[in-house]
Amino acid sequence: STGLLPGISVPTLVVVGEHDAITPPPLSTAMATAIPGARLAVIGGAGHMTALEHPVEFAALLTEHAA
């Protein structure tokens, strides 16, 4: 599916946990780089479940992105 990423034309926020073992930060960085204009946010101390592990920081990122 990575070949489809350059075709995304909507504002995109890629969120990854610093310690995500399932989708590690380097893969998320590559994903964000492939999507035109995408923003990457790394949540420190989080694993794969960033929204559950750091809900306040995750919500702030989404709120900022949606504004």
Image (cartoon, rainbow, N blue to C red):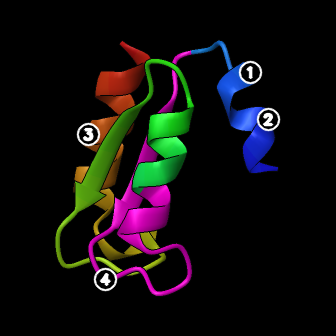
Q: Is residue 25 left or right of residue 23?
A: left
Q: Amino acid at mark 4?
A: His
Q: Is residue 24 magenta?
A: yes
Q: Give, as a single range, the part of the protein colored magenta.
A: 11-28
SS of the residue under disc 1 = helix
Between the residue at mark 1 and the residue at mark 3, the CA separation in whole angstroms equals: 27 Å
Between the residue at mark 1 and the residue at mark 2, the CA separation in whole angstroms equals: 6 Å
Mark identifier at residue 4: 2
Residue marked by disc 1 = 7
Residues at badges 1 and 2 in contact (C-beta under 8 Å)?
yes
The image shows residue 35, relative to residue 44, as above or below, that is above
Residue marked by disc 3 = 60
SS of the residue under disc 2 = helix
Mark 3 or mark 2: which comes first in sequence? 2
SS of the residue under disc 3 = helix
The image shows residue 42, relative to residue 36, as above or below, that is below
What residue sits 39% from the left and 61% below the top? 16
Tag 4: Cα neighbours inside 10 Å, few (<14), some, or many (≥20)? Answer: some
Residue marked by disc 4 = 19
Mark 3 or mark 4: which comes first in sequence? 4
What residue sits 74% from the left and 21% below the top? 7
Tag 3: Cα neighbours inside 10 Å, few (<14), some, or many (≥20)? Answer: few
Mark 2 or mark 4: which comes first in sequence? 2
SS of the residue under disc 4 = loop
Q: Amino acid at mark 2?
A: Leu
Residue 65 position in % (x across, y down)? 37, 24
Tag 1: Cα neighbours inside 10 Å, few (<14), some, or many (≥20)? Answer: few
